Amino acid sequence: MRHRFELFVALRYLKARRKQAVISVITVISILGVAAGVMALVIALAINNGFRNTLQRNLLGTTAHVTILEREPLYGIENWQELVARLRTLPHVRAAAPALYGQVFLTGIRSEGAILKGINLAQELETGDVLRNLRQGSPGALASAEGYPGLIVGSRLAQKTGLLLNSIATLMSPQGELTPFGPRPKTVRFRVVGIFETGLYDFDAGWAFTTLEAAQQILSLKDVVNAIELRLDDIYRAPEVSRAAERIAGPNLSATNWMEQNRQIFNALRMERAVTTITIGLIELVAALNILITLTMMVMEKYRDIAVLMSMGARREQIRRIFVFQGLTIAVVGTALGLVAGHLLCWLADRHRWVRLDEEIYSLSFVPFQPRWTDSVWVAAAALLVGYLATLYPSRNATRIAPAEALRYE
């Protein structure tokens, strides 16, 4: 093994002795400093990844990858059946579905404002994940509710309004019907046939689904929709598919995608990741300073040993490597401890949901921890690099010791 001599001496110097107790304490502090920095970075990046991945997964499960809308909402999209069929032929489009959105008041025991989405059930199941796993009820009952049109509501919305499965809800549309005395709100009774829960508070507390025909009835519209939603086989092709969809849709319609709709939140998470990395990375600089101090004190303590080794034939390059290996050993041990501790804490915190959140503010009920091995690799590499740089100055000073001067009075 190359450099076995230098590594042996470096490890011997790291072992505690009574007269070197101060150096040993600083060595332990240096190891703990590196471990703390690595652990903090792993946890911080895991939180950022958790928020980003959870929000992206939940958002893409509840919203379309690409949405076709009117440029100026007026009368809705007519001949939408033909347009849906044409949009399905675009590359990377896996499914297309019509949708009709409208603002309504939902009344059970109490009243709440809600977004009503009228859907074609078969096509909606192809483009969205909300109705596939209902908390209560079944999506099939949407079109076969007894006596009343079917309605599927979010879990938080059901709690706010006091609605239960199979209860009767009253929906009121503000735009309603046009009478000789002006517009009059329209009221229709629905039967709750399902309750969904996505994990995103805004959707669970404000959305309801019904059939396209029932939504057109309560919104007093003819056979039109105000959105066509596309689901893709590759979510990152959304901008490309948006441009192609606009060419097919014509000048009166525009296309938007999930990246444009959620740009602000994902940009904020990206900025938060950079700021967190820089801020917590300062811990690594403190750890590097500890390593530098440890090695500097070690050189001062061992100058006679260094002189003896050099007088016995040790080359200056070998002396330099002794202290480089010593610093790298501290960095390696600290990095390993930090990685293990960081990943263990992330696993425990995510499994037991240690950090709870206010859903109305953060849309999530707890902080998700999702560490990535790629982050661990670059964090470990950065810690080792900083540790190596901290060894350069003291190891170079060690090679400047003159054996004759150091041993003159021995």
Image (spheres, grey):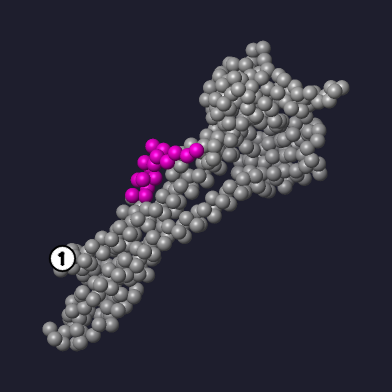
Task: Give the quadrant of residue 296.
Answer: bottom left
Task: Give the quadrant of residue 292.
Answer: bottom left
Say what amino acid the circle numbered 1 marks. Answer: Arg
In the displayed structure, would residue 244 be above or below residue 321?
above
Residue at the image position 32 percent from the left and 62 percent from the top: 331
Look at the image and tell me whether residue 393 can be seen: yes
Residue at the image position 54 percent from the left and 53 percent from the top: 270
Look at the image and tell me whether residue 318 can be seen: no
Quadrant including the C terminus: bottom left
Instruction: Report the number of numbered marks.
Output: 1
- Asked whether, in this view, residue 372 is left or right of residue 224, the answer is left
Taking depth in this image into account, of 96 and 326 the one nearest to the observer is: 326
Residue 353 counted in the magenta span: yes
In the displayed structure, would residue 152 be above or below residue 237?
above
Extreme residue toward the right, this view: 180
Predominant secondary structure, magenta span = helix
Give the extent of the magenta segment: 341-358
- Asked whether, in this view, residue 80 is left or right of residue 202, the answer is right
Residue 64 counted in the magenta span: no
**Please, what secondary structure does the residue beneath circle 1 have?**
loop
Q: Which residue is mark 1?
A: 17
- Asked whether, in this view, residue 14 is left or right of residue 140, the answer is left
In the displayed structure, would residue 226 be above or below residue 121?
below
Task: Give the quadrant of residue 114.
Answer: top right
Residue at the image position 50 percent from the left and 44 percent from the top: 51
Residue 48: percent from left, percent from top: 48, 49
Taking depth in this image into account, of 282 and 113 the one nearest to the observer is: 113
